[in-house]
Amino acid sequence: MRRNRQLTLAIGFCFGLTNYVTVAALQGWPAIGDPHHNAAGAFIERFCAYALFGSGLSFFLPGRVLLVCALLVLSSLSIELSQALRPDRYPSVFCAVQQIIGGIVGAVIAQIVLMFLPRPP
């Protein structure tokens, strides 16, 4: 029971932190190439970041693919909706879909890796 509470608090903290980063104008935030990069660079950045996020969640929650996918969808949608609070940003369904697909691809790759790892006796 205690572990579930810790997991819930950790997930809530991560959602709060990602929304804060989205809303706050942070200077010097890492980006691939120029901060005003083209659409291909933005796609690669979103896809790779969420693939890493999805694989990390998948390694943290092995065997719970549906929970990982639900967390990825929820975090992507919350980030896109929190962008509506900033006047210079706008939410986009296309960006949310890119993030969700990247996260699911990362989660699936991590689950495949976990299938081939030896299990303790």
Image (spheres, rainbow, N blue to C red):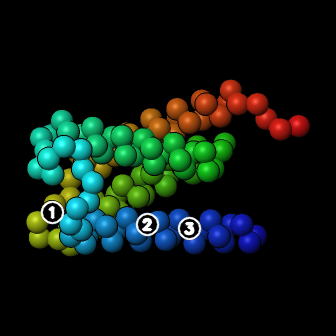
Measure the alpha-carbon separation of dots 3 and 1: 27 Å
The three-letter code of the residue at mark 3 reads Ala
Disc assigned to residue 10 = 3
* Residue ID at (31%, 67%): 21
Report if the CB atoms under discs 1 and 2 are less than 8 Å apart. no
Q: Earlier in the sequence, mark 1 or mark 2?
A: 2
The residue positioned farthest toward the right in the image shown: 121
* Residue ID at (45%, 48%): 53
* Residue ID at (66%, 42%): 63
From the image, tell me which residue sits under label 1: 89
Quadrant position of residue 88:
bottom left
Measure the alpha-carbon separation of dots 1 and 2: 19 Å
Q: Is residue 82 left or right of residue 102?
A: left
Q: Is residue 107 left or right of residue 19?
A: right
Q: Earlier in the sequence, mark 3 or mark 1?
A: 3
The answer, for residue 64, to whether it is visible in the render is no
From the image, tell me which residue sits under label 2: 15
Image x and y of residue 32, in percent? 24, 44
Image x and y of residue 86, in percent? 17, 71
Quadrant position of residue 65:
top right
